[in-house]
Amino acid sequence: MLRCIAIDDEELALELLEDNIKKVPYLQLVASCSNPLEALKIMQDQPVDLVFVDIQMPGLNGLQFIQSCPVQCMFILITAYEKYALEGYNLNVVDYLLKPVELKRFIQACNKANEIYQLKQNQGKETVQSDYFFVNADYGLYKVEKADIIYIEGLKDYIKIHLKSSSKPVITRISLKTLEEQLPSAQFVRIHKSYIVSVAAITSIRRGSVFLNNAELPLSDMYKEKLFGIIGHIE
């Protein structure tokens, strides 16, 4: 769970922000604050992973708050003024949302924060490989069994996970590289910039293509050597 705080000096805007946060299953709302100073006091007493903060506020504004915040956490800026976008990105915020914020766009920003959080949690740790993982899909968390995966297709900022158990792929907003790092290299192999396949699902390889039971996928020259090494290709 991502522990978060919402900050906005407008009562209605704060209520809408609270409502959106409660709709995201992996967010836990620690507190709602009408000003940054109130939030700073709370952050000194309890851990916070993510802060949603408005920019235009009297006294200490959102940008000043981020610059002066002594706590290491992630920030998502929310404002009615697009002119602050560059300043926000210069502060390395996770995302920048313009009011009125649509729920779909809000969830996209939260997904980015969750992906960053999960990567940081795993950095420097020796983790036991599990047989499954969870991804954000259809406004919730979806459990994917590794043994159920046929292949994974990259589409810009999204990926499609094609499964044995379903004719409908799981679509999630995450990079192919990020997911590749979570998969055991002996069981899954990159065959193209846009495809990762389960080694067990491969039926044949010929003429620059990898054939599965239900698909033909392109094989790039740069990935051939690694693929042949994994499958034990014999000349």
Image (cartoon, rainbow, N blue to C red):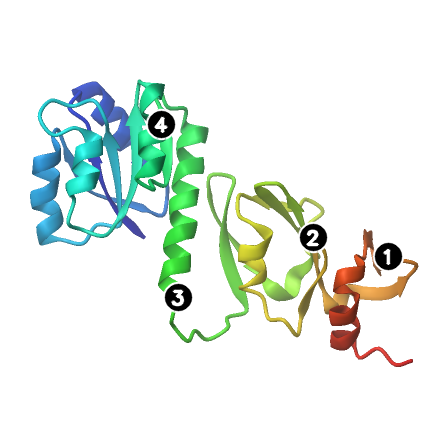
On screen, residue 120 above or below 90: below
Decide which of tag 1 and tag 2 comes sooner along the chain.
Answer: 2
Q: Nearer the viewer, residue 160 or 233?
A: 233
- Percent across and percent down for residue 89 are 36, 36
Kindly indicate whether the residue at mark 3 contacts the one at mark 2 (C-beta within 8 angstroms): no
First in sequence: mark 4 vs mark 2: 4
In the rendered image, residue 199, in percent from the top left (x then y), is placed at 73, 68
Q: Pointers 4 and 1 in contact (CB under 8 A)? A: no
Which residue corresponds to mark 2? 193
Instruction: Give the quarter of the image for residue 36.
Output: top left
Mark 2 vs 3, N-terminal side: 3
Foreground pick, 76 / 212? 76
The residue tagged 3 is: 123
Q: Earlier in the sequence, mark 1 or mark 3?
A: 3
CA distance for labels 2 and 3: 24 Å
The residue where tag 1 is placed is 209
**Residue at left offset 11%, top offset 22%:** 58
What residue sits right under mark 4 in the picture? 85
Q: Is residue 7 visible?
A: no
Residue 144 image position (x, y, % from top left): 56, 57
